[in-house]
Image (cartoon, grey):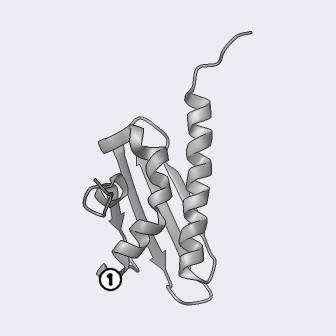
């Protein structure tokens, strides 16, 4: 079954804050789909919210907030002026933060 907005974790768990219209939802969800693999093990314990302030201006700011139950909140931000580039930047930053979180939570092996 192909993933779409209604069946993917991102489609189910992503909320849109200020600055996005309903017309933006499918495109933004698709751009964030690379997070799916990193978040799939958490299921309904994940809450994501993306917002943009001062959209299409030189001071645009995109924020992607990720809360996983029992874990510290992860927040990725971008001030890139192109919205697509900014969404990609917050996605990549959140992936990096999730990788660090996973590394910290894995038990250490003694050799």
Outermost residue on the right side: it is 111
Question: In the figure, is residue 70 to the left or right of 1?
Answer: right
Q: Residue furthest front?
A: 1
Q: Position of residue 88 (x, y in %)?
A: 57, 68
What residue is shown with label 1?
Answer: 23
Residue 82 lies left or right of residue 43; in this view the side is right
Residue shown at 39% from the left, 62% from the top: 49
For the residue pair 19 and 93, the one nearer the viewer reads as: 93
Q: Does residue 68 show up?
A: no
Q: Within 10 Å of the Cα at label 1, are there few (<14), some (14-19), or many (20+) other Cα atoms? A: few
Q: Is residue 36 left or right of residue 12?
A: right
In this view, the residue farthest toward the bottom is 57
Residue 100 lies, in percent from the top left, at 62, 40
Question: Which residue is rendered at x = 34% and y = 52% of the image?
Answer: 9
Q: Is residue 39 above or below residue 15?
A: above
Circle count: 1
Identify the element where label 1 is drawn. Answer: helix
- Left or right of 27 on screen, residue 38: right
Residue at 61% x, 57% y is: 93
66 w.r.t. 100: above or below: below
Q: Check the image and name the residue furthest to the top.
A: 111
Quarter placement of the C terminus: top right
The quarter holding residue 80 reads bottom right
Q: Position of residue 25 (x, y in %)?
A: 35, 74
Q: Position of residue 10 (x, y in %)?
A: 37, 57
The answer to whether residue 55 shows anywhere in this view is yes
């Amino acid at each position: 079954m192909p993933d779409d907005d209604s069946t993917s974790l991102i489609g189910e768990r992503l909320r849109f804050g200020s600055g996005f219209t309903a017309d933006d939802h499918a495109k933004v969800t698709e751009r964030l789909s690379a997070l799916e693999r990193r978040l799939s093990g958490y299921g309904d314990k994940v809450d994501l919210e993306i917002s943009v302030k001062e959209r299409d201006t030189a001071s645009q700011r995109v924020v992607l907030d990720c809360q996983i139950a029992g874990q510290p909140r992860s927040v990725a931000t971008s001030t890139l002026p192109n919205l697509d580039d900014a969404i990609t930047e917050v996605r990549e930053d959140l992936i990096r933060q999730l990788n660090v979180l996973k590394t910290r939570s894995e038990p250490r092996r003694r050799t």
